[in-house]
Amino acid sequence: MRLICSLIIFFTIFNLDVFASELRQELHSRVKKILATMPEGTELTYSVRDLASGLVIDQYQADEMWRLASTSKVFTCDYALQQLGPNFQFKTSLGYKGRIVKGVIKGNLYLQGSKDPTLLTNHLMDMVIELKRRKIKKIEGKLIYPKELGQMISNLGTLDEPYNPNIGILNTNFNRWTFLSEENFPPLPSLVTEESSNRFYYDQRFQLDPSTFEKDNYVERWFYNPSIKNGIKTDAPVRKPHLFSAQSLIYLMKMWGIEIEQVEEAKTYDLKDHWPHPIYEHSSLPLIEICSQALEYSNNLYTEAILLAATKKRTIKEAIDVLMKYLKGKNKLANIELETASGLTYTNQATANSMTQYLANNYLNQYEGGRNFISLLSGNGVNGFMASRMLNTKMFLKSWSKTGTLDYVNNITGILFSSSKRPFGYFVGFYHPKSRKLIEKPLSQRNTAPSLSTSYYKKQGDRAADQLIEYFYDRY
C-alpha cells in the first residue's frame, strides 16, 4: 500500500513537472492570447507552485526581479501576527500633570500614542467627553505631544498623494486632509493653504512649504495649484501627524467649551513618564482585524505602523532590516529586496518564484484564536478589491489573494483552489517598462505624462490576470 501511495505521489509530481518544463520553453497558446490583450511592450511574469510538494509547476520569467507594489503587505501582516499575536492593540492616552482646582487643570495635558494607524477623531472625541465628565472647563497649561518622527512612507511620486502621508506616533484620520473650494478641512490653525504661482509638474496639485519643518514652526503650509477646480474635493497627506492630532483634539475641546490655547512639541518620543494622572486610554481594534483591513483595502499607513509595532523600531528602515532577516533567514528567500512594508515604492522587488515560495512556507499558518493566513486574503467574488473579479460560477471563491498595483505595474498573488481540488500558490505580474520609466524620473525631469492611460492599463491588467488565473485553474 505504501508503495502504491508513493508511486501516485511520484507520478503526480512528475506530471506537474512535465507541464512546467513545457511552458518554460514556450508560452502556451492560451497564455499568448491573454498577453496579446495587454498594451504593446507589456512584460509578464508568473509562478505557480504546488503547495503540497513545494514544487514550481509552471513559470515564466519567474526568476526576474519584479516590482511588488502592495503584494509586499502579505509579508508584513503575517510577520506582525506571528510576533505580536492577533489580540495585540495599539494604545493612545491622554493624561495631565499638576492639579485640578474648580474644573481647571493647573498644568499641562499630554497626548501620547503608540503609532495606532486606526485612530479617528471619533476616538479623540471620547477623550474630550471624559474631560467633560470630570467637569474640566479649562487647561491653564499646554497640550504637549510627542516629537515628530519626520518620516514619509515613501519618496515615490509627486509627494502630494493622500496615500503617502507621514507616519507618526499619533496618526489621526489616516493622516489626510481635504481641500475644497479654496478651504482646507479640518479647519485647524496649524494647517494653512495658499494659492501659488510656483512651477507645478504635470500631475502635481500641492507643494509643501519647505519651512514647515523648521524648528518651533507649528504650521504645516501647502501651496496649491491654481488649476484645481472649485467644488472638487481633493485629499492630501499630512506631514506633521502629531501636530495634526493635537490640534484636532483642541478643536473638539473648544466645541465643548473647554479652554486651551497652546500646543507644544516635546523633545522626546515617549511622554508616558511625564504625567502622573491618566484621563483616558483608547485601545485600537485587535491586530488580526487591522491586518485583515490592511490586506483587504491595501492601506499603506496600516501596514507601516503594523511593522513598526512588530519590530519595536522607530524608523521604517530599521523595521525593514528586521523583516528582511526573517524573510532571508527563516523563509530562505534569496531573491527579494524591500524598502517599505506597504510596497509604496518601486524598489520593493522579488522574483515570482520567491513570492510563491513564501506562500508554500506559510499558507497553513494559524494564529491564536483560530484565524488563518489564507482567511486574511480576499476571496474573489466577495472581498475588497476582489469582490467583482472572476465573478462566475466556476471561479467563485477559488482564488484567495492580495493585489498590488503601481502605475503601469499590476500584480496579484495568493492561493488558488484548482479544478483538481488542490491548493496552488501563484504570483502574476504585468509591467509596462516604457511608461513606468517615464514617471520614475526625478520631478525636475518629468515634463510630460505617458501617453498610455494608467486606468486603462490597470483595467486591462486585472482582466488579463483573471484570465491567466482561470487558465491555471483549468490546467491544474
Image (cartoon, grey):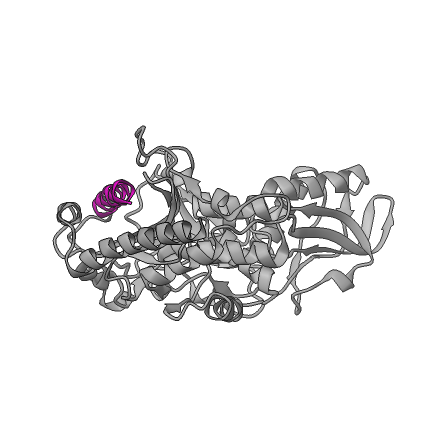
* Quadrant of the image occupied by residue 342: bottom left
* Residue 160 appears anywhere in the view: no
Task: Establish if 362 lies above or below 288.
Answer: below
- The answer to whether residue 58 is magenta is no
Secondary structure that dominates the magenta span: helix
- Whole-percent x and y of residue 351? 32, 63
Q: Is residue 42 left or right of residue 359?
A: left
Q: Residue at x 33, y 61 (%)?
A: 353
Q: Residue at x 53, y 71 (%)?
A: 318
* Quadrant of the image occupied by residue 243: bottom right
Q: Is residue 99 left or right of residue 51?
A: right
Screen quadrant of the C terminus: top left
- Whole-percent x and y of residue 46? 27, 55
Q: Which residues are magenta?
A: 456-476
* Residue 38 appears anywhere in the view: yes
- The answer to whether residue 472 is magenta is yes
Q: Is residue 253 left or right of residue 421?
A: right
The one of 22 and 312 positioned closer to us in this rendering = 22
- Whole-percent x and y of residue 111? 69, 54
The one of 239 and 300 positioned closer to us in this rendering = 300
The one of 99 and 78 positioned closer to us in this rendering = 78
Number of marks in picture: 0
The one of 206 and 78 positioned closer to us in this rendering = 78
Q: Residue at x 65, y 51 (%)?
A: 88
Task: Establish if 8 lies above or below 199.
Answer: above
- Whole-percent x and y of residue 212? 48, 64
Task: Establish if 190 lies above or below 443.
Answer: above
